[in-house]
Amino acid sequence: MADPFELRRIVDDMCRREFRSFAIRAFPVLEGGMLELSHHINIICRMLEKVYDSEVRRALVCIPPRYLKTYLISIAYTAWLLGKNPKTRIVCASYAASLAEKFSADTLRLMRSPFYRRLFPRTILDPNLQNRTEIGTTAGGYRLATSVGGTVTGRGAHVFIADDLLKAGDAHSPTTRESCINWFNSTIHSRFDRPKKGKVIVVGQRLHAEDLPGHL
C-alpha cells in the first residue's frame, strides 16, 4: 500500500509547480465539494501558467457566468501567485466595491487554510494587512481590491486583474461603457512597477459590442 504521507508530499509538490493542480486541490477549501474538470478549465489554467512564466502578458477571458472564471483567476490564481512569490503585487478590480471585497475575502480564507499554509510556509500574512480590500504578506507583496472609479494612487502592481468591470444592467449605457473603458485605460498602465513586464488579465462575459473586451 502506498504511503499516504508520501502521496500527499507528491500532490503538494504538484500544487506548487502547476496551477491546475493547485486549483483542483484548493476548490474544496472554499466550496466543500470537488472541482469537476472540463476543457475550458484546463485551457484557462494553462493560460494562467503562461502568464506566470511571462510567455503571455495580456490575456482576455470571455465566457458566461457560472463557469468558475472568477474562482480560477481572481481567487485561486492570486493566492497561488503570492504563494510562489510573496513579494508579488496584484491589483484586482471589479465593477463594484462589494464584489471586489467578496473576491478578496474568499482569497484570504483560502490563504488562511491549513492546506495553503502547509503548501507555502514562506508566504506569511501580514497581521496588519488583512482587511476588506487588501491582503498583505510580510515580504511586501499584496492583493489589493478596488472598483471602477476607485483609486489605487501610490500602489504599484506586477499583475492587474480586471474581473467584471461592467455590470450587466449597465451594458447598454454608452456613458457607463465609456467610463469603464476610460478608467481601465487611465489606471492600469500607470500602476505597473515595471511597465514592460506588467501583466494584465481581463475577465468577463460579453455584454455589448462596445464593452471593454470589444474595445480591447
Image (cartoon, rainbow, N blue to C red):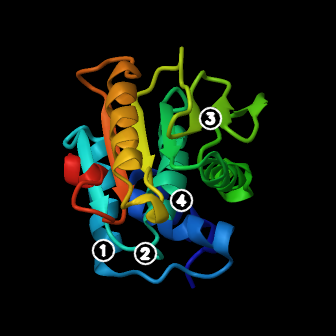
Q: Which residue is mark 3?
A: 122
Q: Of callouts 1 and 4, which one flags the residue occurring earlier in the amino acid sequence?
A: 4
Mark 4 or 3, nearer chain start:
4
| Nearer the observer, 108 or 186 | 186
Foreground label between 3 and 2: 2
Classify residue 73 as left or right of residue 109: left
Front position in the image: 104 or 54: 104
Q: Residues within 10 Å of mark 4 (few under 14, many from 20)?
A: many
Disc number at residue 99? none
What's the mark number on residue 40?
1
Q: Amino acid at mark 3?
A: Arg
Q: Are marks 4 and 2 in contact (CB under 8 Å)?
A: no
Residue type, mark 2 in image: Tyr
Instruction: Please report the residue visible at 30 percent of the width from the left and 59 percent of the height from the top.
Output: 61
Please give the residue where the numbered disc 2 appears in the rendered image: 67
Q: CA distance from mark 4 to mark 3?
A: 14 Å
Nearer to me, 11 or 41: 41
Whole-percent x, y for residue 166 in the image: 43, 54
The N terminus: image quadrant: bottom right
